[in-house]
Image: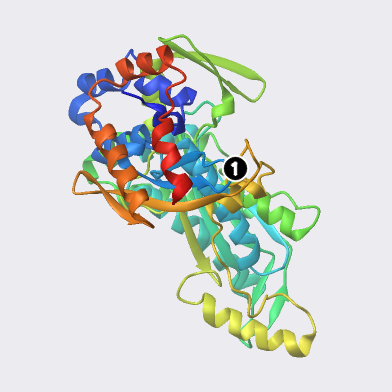
Amino acid sequence: MMLWYFSCMETNILRRIFFDENQHWEQFKIKNGKKIRSIVIKEVEKFRDCGNPKNGFKLFVCEGCHDVRHVPYRCKGRFCTTCSVGESEEWSRLLTEEVLQVNHRHVIFTIDEGLRDIFLLHRHLLKDLMDAASKLLTDFFQKKAKVTPGIISGLHTFGSRVNFNPHVHMLVTMGGLTEKGEWKQYDFLPFAMLRKQWQTVVLKLIRNGVSQKEKKRIQPRLQKAFTNNGEGFYVYAPKQRGKIKEQLRYIGRYIRRPAIGINRIEAYDGQNVTFKYKDKTETVSVEEFISRLIRHIPDEQFKTIRHYGMYSRRSKKLCKKLLSNWQQTARRWVVKVKKTLRRQTWRERIIASGKKDPLVCPKCECYYEYKGEVCLEDGRLEIKVALCPTTRAYLERVINNLTSIKNPQKGKKEKESKPNQKTERQLCLFRVS
C-alpha cells in the first residue's frame, strides 16, 4: 500500500521531541496525570495532528503534467509552532493597517522574580495584570494630557530560558483623543513615577486576588519584592525610530511570538534538548523541556492580546469616526478611511514571505487547479467538494487508503522499497477530467 500522501506532513524538531519513538509526551502524561491542565493536553495533541491528511485536505492537480498535490488542514492551535508563526505574521500585517498612523511606543511592564510563581499558581491573576498595566497608562494620559490613548496589550509568560516570567508588552499611541474628538500628541512617559506606581499596583492586585490563607503564606515574598525594588518594578519604553509601518510590524510580531522558535532549538539526542538564548546555550532533559514549555499554553478562552482605550472593541469604531471627521479640517491624516482589511490566504502568505508560489508546478511550471476537498466529520473523513465524478472516485480511494492504514511505519518501508509506484494509474485519471 502506497503512503505517498504522507509526504505533505511536516516534521520539525519540536514534534520529534514530543512524539518520536521515545514517546516522551505519553510518558509525561502518565507521570504527571491530573496535574496537567486539560487545555494543555488538547493543544499539544492538536499540534501532533497538525498537517496530517487524516484530518482533511484540499486536492490540487497540475493542469499541465497532472501532478497531484494534497494540502492538509492546519490545526490553528495556540501551541503549534507552524500555525502560531503564520498567525503572528498575519496579525502584525493587519495591525499595521488597522491602527492609527501615528507614533507608538513599545512599553514593557515586568514584575519581581520572586512573584512569578504566584502567577503560575494563580493564573486568573494574569488578566488582572494586563488590565492593571493598561489602566495605569490610561489614567496617566487622561490626567496629564487630557486624552484617551490607544493601547494594544500582549501577555508574555515566558522568559528567554523558556522559564515562567509573566510580563506585559504594550503598543501605546503617543497621544490620544480629546473630549472634542481631536487628536493631541503627547510623547512623554515619566518612568520613575510609573515604576513605583506599577510596583504598588502589582502588590495590591496579588493581595486582593488570593485567599486570606494564601495571603499569609506569600506575605514574606511580597515584602521582599517591595524591599528589594526601591525604585519600583522595571518599566521600559524605548523610543521608536524609522517608518511607522515598520515599527508597528516589528512590535506586532514581537507581541505575538511563541514561547520558543524552532530556530532556537540546536540539538535533540533523544533524551536531552539544547536550546540557545541570548549568547548562551542550555541543555535540559526532555521532561524538563516539556514541563517548561507547556506552562505557557494559556487557559481555555484566555485572550493573550487585549485592546484598551481608543482601540477597545466598544469604542474603536466611534473613535475612528471622530478622528476621520477631525482630519478633514486639520489636514493631518491619522486614520485610513474606507480601507477594507482582508486576511491573506495560505498561498498569499507563502508568496509574501519570498518563497515560490505553491500553486505553480515545479515540474512543468503550470498552475495547480483546485479539484476537491475532504474534511473530518464525526470522526470520519467525508468528501466535502468534488468538482467532477473522476475527482470523487479518486478521493474515495484516498480515503480508503488513509482509513485502512494501521501501521504508518510499515507503510513507510513499503514506500522506500518501491519508490517508482507513485499511483500512476490514479494520477492519469485527471488527464481526461
For the image shown, how many numbered marks are present on the structure? 1
Q: In terms of depth relative to the viewer, which is nearer, 313 or 179?
A: 313
SS category of the residue bearing label 1: loop
Residue 331 lies, in percent from the top left, at: 80, 84
Residue 411 against residue 192 in the figure, above or below: above
Q: In terms of depth relative to the viewer, which is nearer, 329 or 338?
A: 338
Q: In terms of depth relative to the viewer, which is nearer, 413 or 229?
A: 413
In the image, what residue occupies the spot 72% across and 59% down?
245
Q: Is residue 221 visible?
A: no
In the image, what residue occupies the spot 24% across and 24% down?
29
Residue 342 lies, in percent from the top left, at: 55, 65
Amino acid under label 1? Tyr
Residue 146 against residue 70 in the figure, above or below: below
Determine whether, in the image, residue 6 is placed left or right of residue 253: left
> Where is mark 1, residue-wise?
234
* Direction front: furthest residue: 432
Determine whether, in the image, residue 94 is placed left or right of residue 297: right
Residue 35 lies, in percent from the top left, at: 22, 30
> Which quadrant of the figure has residue 214?
top left
Residue 325 lies, in percent from the top left, at: 67, 88
